[in-house]
Image (cartoon, coloured by chain):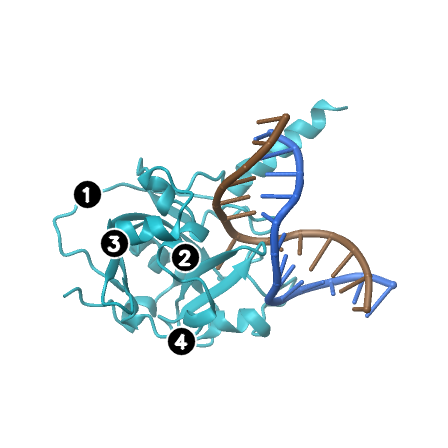
Chain colours: A cyan, B brown, C blue
Amino acid sequence: MLSPLQQDFFARPTLLVARELLGKLLVRHLQDGQRLVGRIVETEAYGVDDPGAHGWRDGRGVLPIGRSAGLFAPPGRGYVYFTYGTHWMLNVTTDAEDVPGGVLIRGIEPLKGLDFMYSQRPKARRERDLTNGPGKIAAAFAVIGPEFFGKDLTRPPLYFSDDPSDQEPFEIETSSRIGLSKGIEAHWRFFIKDNPFVSPGLPSDIAHARKKQRGSHRL
DNA sequence: TATATGATTGCCT
DNA sequence: GGCAATCATATAG
């Protein structure tokens, strides 16, 4: 039995939790008793005095209004939302209650329940395509609805755990977060170096710099 | 009420 | 590389 990480793990500064979630396991119990397990290889931190976080209002920080109120939940709860009209994103809340913080799970190495994950991700041809992106992870782990918004993620059917196996030591790298237009200066993305299950996107600071450069060619 | 955009993915040229 | 999908949320009028 994998024992869930408890609330005290998440009740710490968001950046620390995001970093320490690398190498931990995400565990999902399905209704039929089947279990899905994956190893977290990429995360992003949100909500620490953060223009890139949901609910940010210039000069006023993140406000607990609507969807973003979920970031103010007690630590270890689900913050799940729908975006681009197609995809669900899985986050876990961090830091003290009433402090906005959450960690987005962006990259996972699937360990158990691969057949089920392939059935959830019919477009996936290679193993890495199952879970190398936040929307893919939500689909593969059957988190495709608001069911886990605000839910306690320190117990089944969805929780995090230490890896009981002997894990290779790994190096942690950081970058600007992916897919943002605001808050691109902060390097709040964490990932395991050279791991094939890290998502393929470009960090936002690099993406914006390239765009700028392309624009100047037209002059 | 109306429009723009998004913590993305996958298809198309 | 470009761009459509498709809807919740934010912001403007």
Residue A190: x percent and y percent? 38, 47
* Circle 3 residue: A113
When the figure is inspected, residue A5 is found, relative to residue A176, above or below; the finding is: below
Image position, residue A39 (x, y; %): 26, 51
Quadrant of res A214: top right
Between discs 3 and 4, the one toward the N terminus: 4
Marks 1/3: CA distance?
Answer: 24 Å
Give the foreground label among 1 and 3. Answer: 3
SS of the residue at dot 3?
loop
Q: On the image, numbered disc 1 is attached to which residue? A: A169
Disc 1 and disc 4 in contact, CB within 8 angstroms? no
Q: Residue A74 carries which label?
A: 4
Camera-nearest label, 3 or 4: 3
Q: Check disc 3 and give the amino acid type.
A: Gly
Mark 4 nearby-residue class (10 Å; few <14, some 14–19, many ≥20): many
The amino acid at mark 2 is: Ala
Determine the chain carrying the residue at label 3.
Answer: A
Residue sitting at x 65%, y 64%: A59
Q: Nearer the viewer, residue A40 or A209?
A: A40
Helix or strand or loop: what does disc 2 sit on?
Answer: helix
**Residue under pointer 2:** A138
> Which residue corresponds to the image point at 19% horizontal and 43% vertical from the top-left?
A169
